[in-house]
Image (cartoon, rainbow, N blue to C red):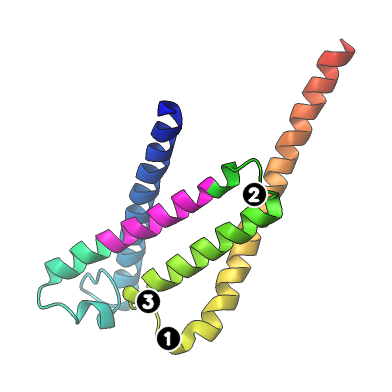
Amino acid sequence: MKSKNRSKGLTLGFGITSGITIGLIMSLLFSYHYGTSYQPSTLAFTAQFANPLTAITLSIVLWGLIGAIFSLASLVFQIETWSLTRQTIVHFFITYICFTVLAGLCRWFPVSWLIFYMPIFVSIYVVIWSVKYLSFKHYVKQINQKLSKKITN
């Protein structure tokens, strides 16, 4: 049991760290692209705060939450009693709903853009899921070939 909890803790820690790192890199890229000063998020988001330090602090918290959600949602793929279809559907809805709410809090896009956002999210999700699926399928094929060789030897 301790091993599973440690694994979940590492997954969560990795997710938070990844979320913050990706958020920081993206904010730097957008800041360089759109202006001469650093903006941790959109102008609509940062304008809510009297102090830029508050905006960056809250941005870091939100980036960490985004990373945590994606890393913890991946744990549904460890539920061996569920089919891959069920795991994928549950994972999709957890990530879609939570990420959409957090992206809204970050003010990354107006609510009116949800009609455009959903197909983009779905497309990216399908591409990533397909690549991972094909990768795991190839890995299982290699394992089966190694097992076949051991059995015949």
Instruction: Tell which residue pokes out farthest to the top in this image.
Output: 153
Q: Secondary structure at mark 3?
A: helix
Q: Using a 10 Å C-alpha cutoff, classify the residue at mark 3 as few (fewer than 14 neighbours), some (14 to 19) or many (20 or more).
A: some
Residue for point 45% across, 50% down: 72
* Mark 1 and mark 3: Cα distance apart in space: 7 Å
- Pointers 2 and 1 in contact (CB under 8 A)? no
Q: Name the residue that disc number 2 marks.
A: 132
* Mark 2 and mark 1: Cα distance apart in space: 31 Å
Q: Using a 10 Å C-alpha cutoff, classify the residue at mark 2 as few (fewer than 14 neighbours), some (14 to 19) or many (20 or more).
A: few
Asked if residue 71 lies in the magenta stretch, the reply is: yes
What's the residue type where badge 2 is placed?
A: Lys
What's the residue type where badge 1 is placed?
A: Val
What's the residue type where badge 3 is placed?
A: Gly
User: Could you tell whether 99 is left or right of 49 in the image?
Assistant: right
Q: Name the residue that disc number 3 marks.
A: 104
Residue for point 74% across, 39% down: 138
Q: With respect to residue 1, does 32 lie above or below?
A: below
- Pointers 1 and 3 in contact (CB under 8 A)? yes
**Is most of the magenta stretch helix, strand or loop?**
helix
User: Could you tell whether 16 is left or right of 36 in the image?
Assistant: right
Q: Secondary structure at mark 1?
A: helix
Q: Which region of the structure is painted magenta?
A: 61-75
Q: Quadrant of the C terminus?
A: top right
Q: Residue 27 lies in what quarter of the image?
A: bottom left
Residue 45 at x, y percent in the picture = 26, 78
Residue 97 at x, y percent in the picture = 48, 69
